[in-house]
Image: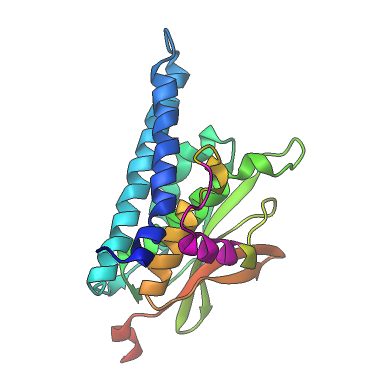
Amino acid sequence: MADNTNIQSIVPLIYDLQTYFLQVQALSNIDQAAKSDLDDLNIVSRHALRMIDYALVSVDANQLQLPLTNVSASAIANDVTASLLKLAKAYEVDLRVETTKTMEPIYTNEAAAKGILYGLAASLITRAQESSVGKKRPIVVIAAQETTPKTQRLGVYSPHLPIGSGAIKTSTKLERRSRSVSPADFHHSGLGLVVSQQLSNQLGQKLQRFEHRGNRGIGFYAPMSMQLKLV
C-alpha cells in the first residue's frame, strides 16, 4: 500500500493539473480563437508542464539523494525569471530579477534550486489579481544576493504582494491535508508552495522569510562552493 503521507503531498498537484487543463480546454473550445487566446493556451500549457517537471524532481528526491554541484546563483535567478516572463505578462505582473553584481558559485542542486524559486514566484504571480495595488502593476522580484562571505540567499519578494511566514505555514498545511482545495480555487491550490517547501527540505535549507529594502520576501540560503571554502 502506498504511503498516505506521500499521497497527501501530491494532492495539490492533482488539483492544480485539473485546473490548468480545464483552462486549456476552455481556451481550445473558443470558436475562431484569437491569437491572444492561443497565446494564453500556450502559456498555461507550458507553465503546467514546467510545474510538473519540478514536482517530479521533488518526488525523485524522496527516493534518491539530490546530487550537489557548484552552480551560479545569479544564473539560476536569471533562468527562472526568463521562464516566467510570459506567465507574468499574462497575469499583468512586472517580473524583475535582482542579483549581487559579483557572486562566487554556491554548492547546491541546480534543478532543486530552480524549482524552489519557480514555485515561489509562480505562486505570487498567479495570486497577483487578488491583491489590489490601485492602477499600479504589481511587482515580483526574483533575487540572488550575497548575505555573508560564505552564504547566498535565493528568493522572491514584492513591494505589493503579501509574502512571508504565512506562505511557509500555508505550504506546510497543504502538504498535510487530504484534500487541499476545491478544484475551482486555482489561486490557492498551492502547488508551487508545496514543491518549493519539499525541495528546500530535501536540500536541508528551510524556507525563511526575509526583508530587503523594506519589502518582505521568502527564500532559502545556500552555502558557498565547498572548493572555494578550502582555498
From which residue to which does the magenta span run? 167-182
131 versus 97 height, above or below: above
Q: Residue furthest top?
A: 32
Residue at figure coordinates x 44%, y 76% from the top left: 205
Q: Quadrant of residue 22?
A: top left
Residue placed furthest toward the right: 134
Farthest-out residue, front: 1
Residue 145 percent coordinates (x, y): 51, 69
Prevalent SS, magenta region? helix
Q: Is residue 95 magenta?
A: no
168 in magenta:
yes
Q: Nearer the viewer, residue 226 or 46?
A: 46
Q: Is residue 42 above or below residue 2?
A: above
Specify the quadrant that holds the N terminus.
bottom left
Q: Residue at x 47, y 38 (%)?
A: 87
Q: Position of residue 67 (x, y in %)?
A: 24, 73
Q: Is residue 6 above or below residue 179?
A: below
* One can see residue 179 in this view: yes
Residue in the image at 64% along x and 55% along y: 158
Number of numbered tags placed on the structure image: 0
Q: Position of residue 131 (x, y in %)?
A: 70, 44
Q: Residue 97 versus residue 40: which sits nearer the camera? A: 40
Q: Quadrant of the C terminus?
A: bottom left
* Residue lying at the far bottom of the rendered structure: 230
Q: Say whether residue 170 is left or right of residue 19.
A: right
Looking at the picture, how far across and down is residue 149, in whole percent? 48, 84
Q: Is residue 16 left or right of residue 137?
A: left
Foreground residue among 142 and 103: 142
Q: Quadrant of residue 111?
A: bottom left
Vertical arrangement, residue 110 with respect to residue 149, above or below: above
| Res 76 seen here | no
